[in-house]
Image (cartoon, rainbow, N blue to C red):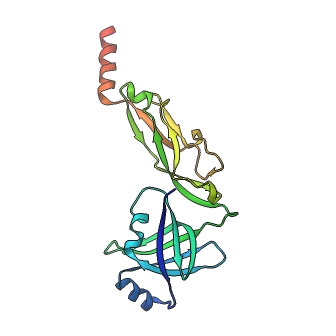
Amino acid sequence: MNTVVIEGQLRTDSGKKAARDLRSQGNVLGVIYGGKEEVHFYAPILAFRSLVYTSAFQIAEIKVDGKSYKAIVKDLQFDVVTDRLNHIDFLELVEDKKVIANLPFIFEGQPAGVKAGGRLQLRLKKVKVRTYPKFLTEGIKVDLTNLELNGNLRVEDIATENMEIMMSGRQPVASVVMTRALRQAETEAAKGKK
């Protein structure tokens, strides 16, 4: 799995004025929680770019004050006017403690319904799971090969190992719908038989 390394500085001052000063120097404030202690730090905004502006699930290795923390992104806060990243929350990965993470789906195969003329609609891109850090992956692979025309693939149909899915099983993930051209052809074929 891809790991992004972030070199941060420990925050010594707290309060709005100190936060504003750090942000004006091009830094983003962050906090790491979930471990033995909460760590407040800051780092240049460019250090977070490959972690924030991607749909891939990644682990962050944050180096602060001579210590290294493995964590996942839990929350992002952006400036309402400039849309610039202001603050980021990380959840520290502790070996014997389960974490909740949003893992993306990795879709594989061409659905049978698409080969028959239908159109694939992806309705869900990520799934919320609870698992131990050692079982975290880049994503959950979903094979779409057997998805028929007018068929649905739901959350309950997806098999995962060592993970508990934290979403409703009835929620659709992908479906193959009939295209307008295919529906028109079927209508004309039905009229021709009469």
How many marks do you count on the picture?
0
**Farthest top residue in view:** 194
Q: Residue at x 42, y 28 (%)?
A: 113
- On the image, the x and y values in percent for residue 32 come to 56, 75
Foreground: 167 or 89?
89
- On the image, the x and y values in percent for residue 100 come to 60, 60
- Asked whether the viewer can see residue 2, the reply is yes
Q: Residue at x 33, y 30 (%)?
A: 179
- Left or right: 135 in relation to 194: right
Image quadrant occupied by the C terminus: top left
Q: Residue at x 51, y 50 (%)?
A: 139
- Left or right: 128 in relation to 97: left
Foreground: 10 or 98?
10
Q: Residue at x 57, y 68 (%)?
A: 70
- Left or right: 135 in relation to 148: right
Query: In which image quadrant can residue 133 be found?
Result: bottom right
